[in-house]
Amino acid sequence: MNTSEKIEQISKSLVESIGEIPNPAKNAVNPHFKNRYADLAGILDTAKPILKKYGLTVIQSAETDANLVTVKTRILHVSGEWIESALTLTAQGTDPQKIGSAITYGRRYGISAMLNIAADDDDDGEQNRTKNGIHSQPEKNIVKQAESQKKNDSEPVLSELDSQIVTILETLSKNPEVRKKTLEYLKNRNVPGGEKIHFLKLTDREKEKILDTLVEKGAEVVAFVEGQVKK
């Protein structure tokens, strides 16, 4: 994931907009597996009005190399600040129709991941990707890492507050160690006895305190933690 030099304003707007964007209606059906999903137009129609409300827009571009397709999704703020991620796909072939399908697939999943929305049924997700000849190689992010850790440790499912917090942390630092230590620092500072409590076990009120601090002073806190990590 790449970002502009400063992201204070876009971070605040993105957190607020993600909190309001609902999961889009699943308005299409995969003919092979009969699972329902939201098409790209449905996702954009759902997200764009709320993004506009907070001074945000989405720009997507695609690059191809034979049957390798890379889709970049950039969220842009009126301040000029931006956050960008990339999704690389291998299309089934190199003819325009197959390349076009891979690009649409990449755009749909790229924007869904950036905005933390669920656009399809997960049960047959991997089967659908294999059936369509598309194999994704997404960037790893802290949300997926946390979800994986949660499953392994039988932790509760990530809540909306959890996802908002880890999304901001990911935008503020590319260093996993800094993100982890920043979360621990905020937990210990905002929650009495926080050093003994797992983040996912905190109450919503306690998580809201952490989220508020991230929105208001996230860049400063991360800079401080980075300094401690380098020592």
Image: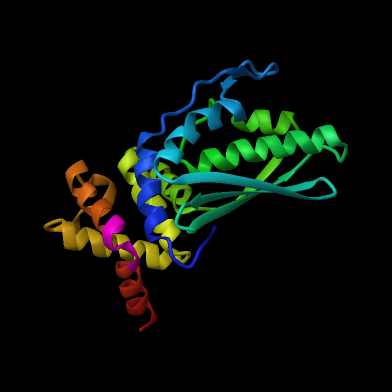
Using the image, determine if residue 59 lies above or below residue 124: below
Q: Quadrant of residue 35?
A: top right
Between 142 and 7, which is closer to the camera in this rendering? 7
- Work out whether residue 153 can be spotted: no
Between 48 and 162, which is closer to the camera in this rendering? 48
Using the image, determine if residue 72 lies above or below residue 186: above
Residue 140 x, y percent position in the rendering: 54, 53
217 is within the stretch colored magenta: yes
Q: Is residue 228 left or right of residue 131?
A: left
Residue 72 x, y percent position in the rendering: 64, 50
Instruction: Name the residue furthest right.
Output: 95
Q: How is the image coloured?
A: rainbow
- Work out whether residue 110 can be spotted: yes
Marks counted in the figure total 0
Q: Is residue 99 left or right of residue 229?
A: right
Q: Is residue 172 left or right of residue 33?
A: left
Residue 167 x, y percent position in the rendering: 41, 51
Between 68 and 147, which is closer to the camera in this rendering? 68
**Residue found at x 73% / y 37%:** 102
**Residue found at x 30% / y 68%:** 221
Residue 50 x, y percent position in the rendering: 42, 35
**Residue found at x 53% / y 25%:** 121
Using the image, determine if residue 223 lies above or below residue 10: below
- The chief SS type of the magenta part is helix
Which quadrant holds the N terminus?
bottom right
Span of residues in magenta: 214-219
**Residue found at x 42% / y 54%:** 10
